[in-house]
Amino acid sequence: MIRHLIKLIWNKKKAHSLLIAEIWASFLVLFGLCTLIVFNVRNYVQPLGFNYDNVWAINLSNNQDTTAVVEKTQQVLQRIKAYQEVESASLLSSELYPFSSSNNGTSATYKKRNTGVNFLATDENFAKTMSINTVAGRWYSRADVGGKYVPVVINRKTQEALFGNENPVGKVLADYYLKNKWIVMGVVDTYKDKGEFMQNKATLFEMTVPKSDWYKTLVIKVKPGTDAVFEANMLKAITAIVKDWNVQIVYLDAARKSKINQTLIPTLIFLIICGFLLINVALGLFGVLNVSIARRRGEIGLRRALGATESSISWQFIGEMWVLATFALVLGLLLAGQFPLLNVFDLDAGVYLVAMAVSVAVIYALVTLCAFYPGWQAAKLQPAVALHEE
Amino acid sequence: MLTNYIKIAWKVLLRHPFYTFITLFGISLTLTVLIVLTSLMDHLIGSHYPETNRFRTLYVERMALTNKEKTMINSGSMSFKFLTDYAKTLKTPERVTIFSGDHKSNAYVGAQKIELNSRFTDAEYWRVLNFEFIEGKPFNEQNIANGDYVAVITDGFKKQYFNNSGELVVGKRIDIENVSYTVIGVVKGSPITRMFSYSDVFFPYTNPKSNYRSMEYGGSYMAMVQAKKEADLPAINEEFQARIKRIPITNIEAGFKDGSLEVRSEPFVQYFLNVLSEGDPARVATFYAIVGFILFMLIGLPVLNLVNLNVSRILERASEIGIRKAFGAPIRTLLWQFIIENIFITFIGGAIALMLTYALIYGINASGWIAYADLSINANIFIISLLICLVFGLLSGLIPALRMSKLNIADALKA
């Protein structure tokens, strides 16, 4: 049966080459779209790792005031902690609050194993403020400071990259210059600070070093229901301490929304455009099949007269389309297969494979749908009518 | 002859409404996407309010310091002093303005919080950019010298801060980060996509929070250098680069001693491409490859689709072709007939696409996706759209026309 179908198609290869090209191109577009969607969905299902409800970030910048920056920052922190509306407050590297647009990366090494990590320095209250749970060990505390090494917490991704199955708690890590510097106090699950659509990346939290003016961002968790009136009062109190500084307050849930939109809007636009392209292709295929099947009335009549059933006629046309689609898909898969093989765009091979599988399924569904109605109409043809015309 | 072809094309369109629908659906959707993209591109890189002099302006947005060993690069905006020393004093340009990047802060009105962007500018800023003043006037050199606490605000911010009241606000006071300023002017806001003019509030650079006294090279300022005419731009760039070359890098922050300093002054399109690619040639190549692929698919797929449909419908026209051939019409004439027919149909699709685009653009502008968006269909976009239609028509018409005109007379007459 299949050999017969292939022969039928081979006989009209010139007419079919354009159809194959069209299906091939549709597959590639679909593959691109599916890759994007699969990539984003896979990232989305990974937990965020922290809670942003009622958390605000406060960015301080000292401008031209360079006297006693550390002391003034500490004063601001103490003032904020004194409010009863504030449940918890933490100081961290400037501008590196969750959902910010800033990044800081470095690398960490353990016994010749090396990985790039997102780097963030925070004080001991960060885990409490952001509701981060440790899965092994514990978050660092004030008491850990002063030893030979700087206390750090890593996420599971870093653990996998550096330690494999080994227990990392208490181990010493080397920094970018391969100097032993950090001691691991605990492990957290995930920390996707750029939002749900961010890829789960290796992360390293370092305990803030005293007397450094690198840390001028605060995150604070306020009691539910705290409003802008409190915020304005707090701002007034802060600016009373640091007069010529800039003070910017960001609600993390608002920052998160804009981060999510950065991924969601382009994906949606791409999805809409591809959707219309595919509808276009489906209509076109349907038209082409309608015309070409109508022209094969003689052949259909003959087969019917020789005893072919209605369903076998329908299946013939659907089968022909499947064979055509398979040709196109083999060509398409050869090209798409280069993406995981050559590691283009640095994505996990699994993303490409799932995208390929989904695209192949959609293409088969599409051609089946397009061949179904014309095939069904052809099958209804009375042999006498069809043969009479010849 | 042409009218005849068009008449025939029209009749063919009317004969099979379903196929006509498929054809026009494909054409108009594809063209809509392409025209909207063109309009978006024009919005991003064209000369529009208030940056109407983009074509004769050079942008000095960042400097890149590389150390001697080329292992470290420090790149970012510059300090006010740096730009005053090396850009403000240029001889060839008409005007030079120095202004800071936009900076987020908050203002409070009662229990309501307003998030706003502000920037610090000099007085020249208001001459280089063509802001439309709804109320009041810009701050001038005198305000700056006095260190006045004045601000120019946008109409959007006025609405938020003064609760939609229609009254004039010049002379009223606004509180931003607990500092009180007098409103000196209200301008029509600029879209968020124009990073050199977008902001809610503009302060004179002598504001105590502006950091303009910093002695370092790096800072938060950039400059626009405006020429009298576009042709002067290369000369200005030359003068600027000659100055940059003479800057001593010996007394610079540790680690970058005897390194190299690069400060580009470039026209907007070039600047825009550099931002997209982050100055990395490999990324430029990837970027072009992706854009090329998307455009190829966007045009290629509908073209293939149309070609397929037209080729399979060849026999509908067989009798006509047969008769014309039998009476001696050469292949070339038939070829032209079918191509012209196809271009005619494409233009119908193009007209529909223009209407759809108009609706879409209206929707985008009204939706507030891009604050102050002013996408439009102007003469340039219209001409580009016509060109796109022509190319699309030619591409999708050629193969079917070739197949049709090559049809055998006997076969054609028999069918």
Image (cartoon, helix red, strand yellow):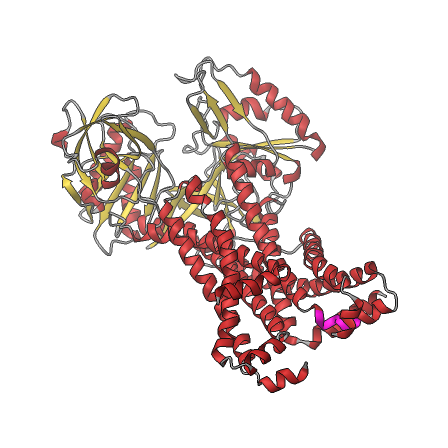
Q: Image check: A365 left or right of B414? A: left
Image position of A368 (left or right of A151): right
Residue displayed at 63% across by 26% down = B237
- Left or right placement of residue B156 versus residue A179 in this view: right
Q: Is residue B221 depicted above or below B300 in this figure?
A: above
Main SS, magenta residues: helix
Q: Residue at the right extreme?
A: B328
- The spot of residue A345 in percent (x, y) is 43, 41
To which quarter of the image does residue B111 belong?
bottom left
Residue A194 appears anywhere in the view: yes
**Residue B72 percent location from the top left of the image:** 42, 23
> Residue B367 appears at what percent x and percent y?
50, 60
Residue A226 versus residue B148 in the image, above or below: below
User: Going 23% across and 41% down the picture, which residue do you hit?
Assistant: A156
Q: Nearer the viewer, residue A208 or B394?
A: B394
Q: Nearer the viewer, residue A192 or B375?
A: A192
Q: Where B22 falls versus A91 (above or below)?
A: below
Q: Quarter of the image for the N terminus of chain B: give it.
A: bottom right
Across and down, in percent, residue B138 comes to: 56, 41
Residue B167 makes an appearance in the image:
no
Q: Residue at x 46, y 59 (%)?
A: B164
Total count of labels: 0
Outermost residue to the front: A306
Q: Quadrant of the C terminus of chain B?
A: bottom right
Q: Judge whether residue B411 is colored magenta.
A: no
Foreground: B164 or B303? B303
Which segment is the magenta one? B315-320
Most extreme residue toward the left is: A143
The answer to whether B298 is drawn above or below residue B239 in the figure is: below
